[in-house]
Image (tube, rainbow, N blue to C red):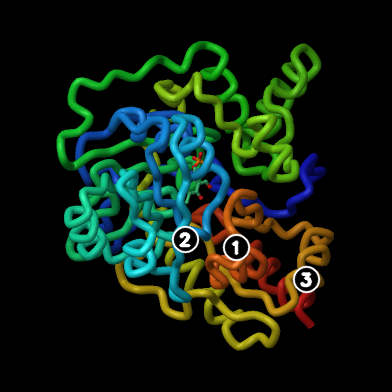
Amino acid sequence: MNLPIDEKIPKHPVLSLQSFTNEQGTEIPSILDAGDVRYLNRGSLAIAFALQHSGISHGDEVLIPAYHCLAMVEPVLWVGAIPTFYRIQENTEIDLADIGHRLTSSSRVLISPHYFGFLQDMKLIRVFCDEHHLILIEDCAHAFFGRRHGQPPGYYGDYAIGSAWKFFPVDEGACIVSSRGNLSGTATKSAGPFLEIKSLMNTLEYAVDYDRLGMLNAPIRSILKLKDKMWGRVIPSPVTPGVGEALELGVATGFDGKRVKQRNSIFSRLIIDATSKSRIVKYRRENYSRLLSALSSLPGCKPLFGVLPDEVVPHVFPLVMEHPEVVFPLLKAAGVPIIRFGEYLWDGMEQGLCPVSENYARRVFQFPCHQDLKPAELSWMIEQIGEAIK
Ligand SMILES: Cc1ncc(COP(=O)(O)O)c(C=O)c1O
């Protein structure tokens, strides 16, 4: 296999025939079960949709956790609101006491994420928001599936947002959900022909890059080569600019305010519908458990969550590194896929506001545990992590 990509195993879910095979096991609900759903293109656009829909604008303050990614800040800036950062605790629960101290008469919205799929205590957060008249945006970008207090992710928010491409074998796709009737009468726009084609092509290209389509790999590869010749690769490779530069260019996350109401492609919706949810749940949990038992006792690193609760469906496997600057280049050179949520914190956030967040931004590396990793790929990744940490 001659991969045109730096990562030897897939960072994200990959389309294959197995994507559609159901598995026996516990049924765990998803954000799609939480209420009224509208499909959109990206989670960051879904946050912008929620802010716009609730009339947030210039001078309003939106509370964002100090451990965040730029995709959570950009929509707030786009509506002209002011991001106000709050602390999180070591176990990643948001710090309601700290939020309480930061409230002003302009505070309007609280964005609360479920880090890496581990659900916050939303019952408590809901009560807090009601007491302080805050609109609650439940950020389920890392938690498409799960259950806590008997409810799916997204149930407690005035709005909830999900990022489907992190869980399903699609190139784009997100949703906004409301269990409180907030979306009635809202319309979304078609993705348009360019996005429809791009979504299909990129999904197939990713699957072929990792040889996941069996007998179809060769013919699809030939078609894609022809397309490349005629058109160039449809998507440019992702750019990772510096924070200031990224925000100026508006490319930190691909955020484009003109696309706030744009739906995901029909192809992405079909795949999301047809993909086996039970398989996603089963293999993400199994892969997480395998990583946990292989990496828990390694010196030089510590799993951020040492226990996988029964109804959590993890997005990734977050590992706290003792020497991140040493380990990162070694893993990159070996071709291990690493996700760095929070690698770039918003420039305007006061330094020292939340030492936990600053520490996690530097030290927590996230490794894939998605349903499409083969056992041999997982073993290879475990071996590479062990080698790099030695
Ligand atoms: C917590 C969180 N919220 C929102 C987003 C935005 O989602 P998307 O990448 O679909 O725009 C991300 C992206 O990684 C995220 O990590």
Residue 205 drawn at (x, y percent): 66, 32
CB within 8 Å, label 1 to label 2: yes
First-in-chain label (2 vs 3): 2
Residue at the image point whose x is 78% and y is 69% from the top: 325
- Residue 103 appears left or right of 358: left
Please tell me whether residue 254 is drawn above or below residue 195 in the rendered image. Answer: below
| Coordinates of residue 90 in the picture (x, y in percent) | 47, 76
Q: Residue at x 59, y 58 (%)?
A: 350
**Three-letter code, disc 1:** Gln
Q: Which mark is residue 327?
A: 3
**Element marked by disc 1:** strand
Please tell me whether residue 9 is drawn above or below residue 361 in the rendered image. above
Q: Which mark is residue 366?
A: 1
Asked if the beta carbon under badge 1 is closer than 8 A to the nearest atom of ligand 1, the reply is no
Circle number at residue 116: 2
* Residue type beneath disc 2: Phe
